[in-house]
Image: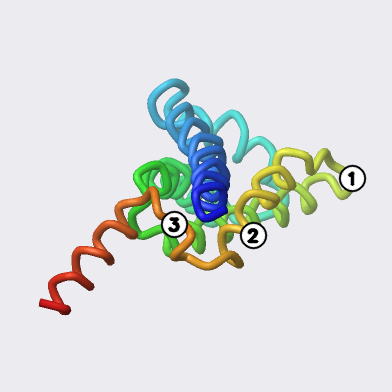
Amino acid sequence: MQLNRSVGILTMRLILAFLFFWQGYGKVFKFGIDNVYENFFKSTYQDLLPDFLVLATAYYTTFVELIAGLLLVVGIKRDWALYLLASVLIIVTFGHGLAEPIWDASHVLVRAIFLIPLLLLPKDWDRFSLDYLIGRTRDNQLDN
């Protein structure tokens, strides 16, 4: 049972990590963040929000997706990565709702379905992570 929990947590963490990481990666390295800003963020929100806020949001959400996704892949600073990714989901939900009150929320809901349980389940069940290994090493050093 303990192995099943650990594999289940790892599976949730990696699916969520790759969903966010590849999205951030594509925005930075495939399309270019400036192109993403000009062709999606600015064109969608230019009449709804101040330009500086739209630009800051484009950069914030993109780099959080990329960096926090990578942190989740290796399982380090897991909770901070999850907090940041939760903020992205809230921003995206607000932004899409502002632009179009009835929108396809499926991409946000899928990520939330993986993110929220990771926040709620005990962190020590996530045994296949650097956080867990660092914690065990630290605990062993304190015992000696």
**Quick one: which residue is furthest to the right in this view?**
102
Residue in view at x 63 percent, y 53 percent: 89
- Dot 1 falls on a residue whose secondary structure is loop
Q: Which residue is mark 1?
A: 102
**Disc 2 residue type?**
Ile
Q: Nearer the viewer, residue 109 or 34?
A: 109
Q: Nearer the viewer, residue 73 or 37?
A: 73
Between marks 2 and 1 in the image, the one whose residue lies nearer the viewer: 2
Amino acid at pointer 3: Ala
Q: Nearer the viewer, residue 2 or 139?
A: 2
Q: Residue at x 13, y 72 (%)?
A: 141
Left of 69 or right of it: where is 43?
A: right
In the rendered image, residue 68, in percent from the top left (x then y), is placed at 42, 49
**Location of mark 2 (residue):** 116
Quadrant hosting residue 29: top left
Label 3's element?
A: helix
Mark 2 or mark 3, which has the lower sequence index? 3
Asked if disc 2 and disc 1 are in contact, CB closer than 8 Å, the reply is: no
Residue at label 3? 81
Q: Residue furthest bottom?
A: 143
Task: Please identify the quadrant where the C terminus is shown.
Answer: bottom left
How far is disc 2 from disc 1 in space, using C-alphas? 23 Å
Residue in the picture at 50% in, 35% down: 18
